[in-house]
Image (cartoon, grey):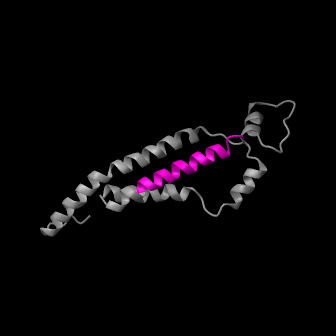
Amino acid sequence: MSGSAQLPARFEDVEALEDFMTAPSPALVEDLAALDGDLIVLGVGAIGLAAMQYRARRWAAFASGANGIVVALAVLGWLFYTLTSVLSCLMYFTVPLSALSALLSLLAIGPILKTAAARQRLADAGLSLGL
């Protein structure tokens, strides 16, 4: 519940109750307005990193793992920060899925290194894959 909003004696209907419960506090709105960038940039960056992992680029697995860890920690911090005002079930899925993303990216490092070495051997033999 927002800190400055007064609890009404009665809600007219379920929609009014939901609106009251999910409305962010003015302090939260001010904090969000003060942020320089959006967390969505991390998600958009993850798409490009996934494409590079698919193409077996060494650096992409490390970057994807780091991105997954950063997203998991950022969303976990956001969950605790908004625990008393805005609650979303999506938050409960995002943290473990981001951590799983980081784990799978880090587990892919070994196979990606093997694929990159095989690609280099093929390129040295004149059989470039063009990837």
Give the left or right position of residue 107, taking residue 40 as reference.
left
Q: Quadrant of the N terminus?
A: top right
Q: Classify 38 as above or below 7.
A: below
Could you tell me which residue is drawn at 51 percent across and 53 percent down?
70
Labels in figure, total = 0
Give the left or right position of residue 2, taking residue 41 as reference.
right
Could you tell me which residue is drawn at 40 percent across and 46 percent down?
103
Residue 90: horizontal and vertical position, in percent?
57, 41
Between 121 and 29, the residue placed more toward the observer is 121
Q: Quadrant of the C terminus?
A: bottom left
As for residue 66 lying within the magenta part, the answer is yes
Residue 12: horizontal and vertical position, in percent?
82, 31
Can residue 51 be seen at all in this image of the molecule? no
Could you tell me which residue is drawn at 19 percent across and 59 percent down?
118
Can residue 11 be seen at all in this image of the molecule? yes
Residue 87: horizontal and vertical position, in percent?
66, 40
Magenta stretch, main secondary structure, is helix
Where residue 127 sits, quadrant-wise, is bottom left
Give the magenta part as a residue range. Answer: 64-84
